[in-house]
Each structure stands twice: as structure tokens, then as C-alpha cells.
Image: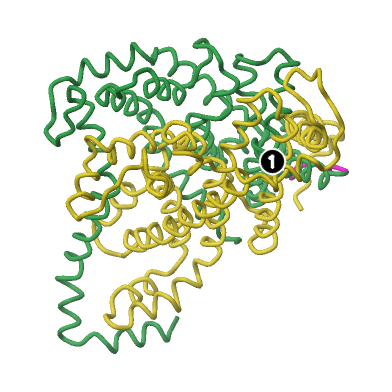
Chain colours: A green, B yellow
Amino acid sequence: MSAVSASTSETVVTYEGRWRRRLYPIVMHAVMLTAVFLVTFPLIYALILSTQDSGIGSLRPGTAIVENFRGAWARAEMALLIRNTLVVALAVAFGKIMLSIMGAYALIYFRVRGGMILLAVVMLTHLLPLPVRIVPTYDLLTELGWVDTFKGLTIPFFASATGLLLFQQFFRTVPTDLADAARVDGAGPFRFLISILIPVSRTNIGALFLIEFVYMWNQYLWPLIVANSVRTRQVQIGIKQLVATDAVIEWGILTAGAITVIVPPLIVLLVLQRSLMSGLSSSTEDF
Amino acid sequence: MNTVFPNRILPYLLLAPSVILVLVFFIYPAAQSVELSLYRVNRVRDVQVYVGLENFQRLFESDNYINSLTVSAKFTVAVVAAALTISLALAVGASLPIRGFGIYRTLLIWTYALSPAIAGVIWALLTDPAIGLLTDVFNAVGINFNWRQGKDDALIFLIMAATWKILGYDILFFLAGLKNIPHEVLEAAALDGANSWTRFWRMVLPLLRPTILFLLIMNTLYASFETFGLIDITTQGGPGRATSLLIYELYQDGFKSSSRIGLASAQSLVLLGIVATLTFIQYRFISRRTFYQ
């Protein structure tokens, strides 16, 4: 590191100094603003189109925004689909958080014979993403009578190697004194878990909630196969229906539907962004 | 080790739900994938003939499947290369120690919340042959772009949409990786005129190596599997079979035809081979950490 700072100070002559203090930040702001604009432009364009009568396609906002959103919500039964997707995303997020905390707690705070093998079994989920077992998993759902049910859309997703590793890693960093003190105070394993361990894990819980909520909200393939009726249909498939209903795509209505679907995960991202960032930074340290 | 509580049965009860779910919904179906790949079998299962490795042989003798492998490889390489390059540049930019730059760290990660299907809708709009704004731009510089009819155009269209969607995720991880790099290193790499490029390569990039390797694997998995919704909502594998990636072929054979269950299962195992290779690389060269989704 010392070599770095030495050579930096060498180059700070008058010209370099002014460049560094005045112009450089302005130029970099301009560069970054352009980048943000380019990355965000497709969404802005979609927003503009959601205000227009279909088929215009100019950059001038129109006056049909209410009609377009009404149209999208009516045609895709958006209110019901949002409810359905919320049920699935929240159930899986909470289910995964609960199961991974339970598993990591068992592995770190108890003596588990064969713990490594049990951990390895859960880790196998990384090797077996849905496409690798999709036909037999669907058959299994048929046998269980879970096709077109919320059980079928959620329970197969509950096990989480990601969450288990995340909490296992985190629990290792929790000072041993905490658990010792709890034991001396006469707290049983459940009291310790609920009143100490879970509260100190809230950043990791927030990070995992964000990841799983967004993941489930954006599910496409599994709901396409499993949720065959509007009773369980998920938002992404609702968008597919807006695309597929007409020979001529009504862009105003389609973009209104798409924007509706983007909003919930975007809110979750904004609220929990900090948790995710600090969860990621601490977990990437041991790479 | 901080083993504190003496209970003997409790830990097994805590682990049981996870282990049972993995056995029932992961290992048992995966074993069945292996079994089914050795049979000629239809959806209702009234025909079930053991055929050994015939399904694999059919697969690799099929022009369509070879085409799908080629298209998937092109798509994946393009998406991974474009996404990593762009997101690394943007993340390094947003990490510069300049006042007011914190806002870019928020404004650049939002595509993380987007689904591939929605990304498809938005890019279909941007590049619509009739009303697309980008189509006009392309026309203005003399490029005729029509992804609904041109085979190469269709693949390029998917690459653009898929790359755009994953930028948020990649930038998020690069920002997290860059957070661990001292400010002076970044500043020195960004500032000093002629030397900055060399400094970036020599000092910043090596420190980001683990993040890059991790994202390389995650983006490959994303391009291979998560882009199903993007394809299904836009090109549906066409025109012809120009954008029928492996995951789309699998869906077609497994769920859109009634007699190709064995063939679909063989395809599942090909995908397992790809995942296994990536997982091996990840464990070998990175660590046990994974953020899968």
C-alpha cells in the first residue's frame, strides 16, 4: 500500500491538483449521470407509453394513464394475481428464513452427530436446480394433488442451502459469551434463540428476505406449469396473458401491467437494500 | 466451537424439516430424472419401455438439439461477457470517493428487482419493428433491426434484454466487493491519467478476482436457466429455432408434447452436467459461500 500513496503524491503537481479538485468530480458526475440515464431509460420509456393511447410510441406523455392501468388490472385480474403472488413470496421468504435459522442453530449450538452429512444433503440443492428435476417434480405434485395449489407453489421451495450457510456463517461470529450468559441465567435453547439470536441476526434476515421475496415474485417457469387457474396464477404469467390476448399488442395496457408488477419488489429492494449490502460485504470477506 | 446446549434430540428436530424437504423435492425427483432418461415413456405412462442410452443418442444426433446447444453457448458467452464488463465499469465508477456518489449506488442496482419476463416486455417495446424507439435509432445509422423476423436479430435482442436485467445484480455484488478495497487504491487507479488503466488492471482487478469468479458462475446459471421467462414472453424460441435455448427445448419436450418424457429427462441430465461442472469450479476456486438467486 505504501508504494501506492508514494506514487500518487508524486504526480500531484499544479495541473494535476486542479484537475483533481475541480474538474474531475464534475466530469465523473456527468459520466455517472449518463450511465444512470442509459440504464434507466428503458423503464422511463415504458412509463411514458403507459400514459399513451396504444400505438403512438412518441416520447410525449399522453392522457390515457388511468384507462391503461384500469385495462391492465381488469384484463389480467391483477388485484387477485398480486394477492396470489404476495402469498407465495411471503410464505417462501418466511419459510426459508425459519428453516435456515433452525438448521444453522442446530449445527452451531448443539453437538450433532452426522451434522456434516446432513449439511451436505441440504447443500445438494445447489446441484439440483428445478430444470434438472422438473418433470418428476411435476409428477410428484400430481400424485400429492398439489397441482394448482399454493402448497405446490411454495413448499418445494422451502429448503435453502443459501440461507443455511448464511446463518451458519453468521452464528459463528456471534460471541460465545452471549450463549454462556444466557445459560447461566437459566435461559433454555428456545429463549436464547428467540430473545437473543434472532434479534442480533436481523441484518441477515433482512438480506435473505429481500433475496427470496424478489426471487419468488419473479418466478415464471414453475407457476406456468403448476398454477393453471386464476385461483393461484402469479403476476408474471398475468403479463404473459396481456402479451398473448391480442394479435396487435396494446402497448399502453401492457406497459401499465408491467409497471404494476415491478413496483412491489422495487419497494422491498429500496427498504432492505442496506441490509443486503452489509450482508454481502461481510459474507464476501472470506472468499 | 461454541457448542453450548446439551440437548440430544432437539438439533435433529430442528434440521429434520430441511432434510426431509430436500429428500422429497430434490433428491427423489432427481433420481427419477436419471431413471426416466433410460426409458421411452409418455405422459400418462401407459407406454414405458427400457431403452438404455437411446434417449441420449437421439439427443446428440438431433440437429435441433445441437442447434440449441450452439445457440445457448453463444447466448451465454455474450450475456456473461457483456454483463460483467458493463457492471464492473459502472460499479467502479459508483465507488469512487467523490461527494454525492452514494446516490449512484442506489440508482444503478434497481434492475435487480426486475424479472426476465418484464425485461423482455420492455425491450420488445424499445425494439418493436413498428414503434420502437431503438429501431428508429438503428434505422438512422443504417442498421435494419427486426427481431421478429431476423434470426441473428432475435438472438441479439435476447442478449440485450438479458444483459440489462442482470446488471443490477452484478453491480450489487461488485459494489460489495469494492467496499472491501481501500479508497486510496481506487482513487489512485481512477485518477492518474496515463497510468490509471495499468493501475486498475494491476491493483483493483486482482482484489476483485473472487467476486468476478463468483459472478461468472452465477451469470452463467442465470443465462442458462432464469431466462426462460424472457424467451417465452418474446421470441418463443423463434424465428425458426434461432432462440430455442436448452431450457426452452426442455420445456417443449417435457410439457408441450405427450410422448417425450424420456427425452426431456435426458436433457435434464445434460443440464445437471453443466450445473455440476460450475458447482465444482465454484467449490474448488472460491469457497463454500453461495448466494444462489
- In which chain is the residue bearing label 1? B
Residue A154 percent location from the top left of the image: 61, 23
Quick check: is A33 in the magenta stretch?
no
Hey, what amino acid is under mark 1? Gln
Residue B107 can be seen, yes or no: yes
Residue B129 percent location from the top left of the image: 27, 38
Q: Which residue is mark 1?
A: B267
Question: Quadrant of residue A1 in the image?
Answer: bottom left
Residue at x-position 14% and y-position 71%: A22
The total number of labels drawn is 1
Residue B170, placed above or below residue A79: below
Residue at x-position 49% and y-position 17%: A84
Given residues B29 and B248, the one toward you in this image is B248
Question: Quadrant of residue A47 in the image?
Answer: top left
Q: Main secondary structure of the magenta part?
A: loop
Report the magenta residues as a range: A108-113
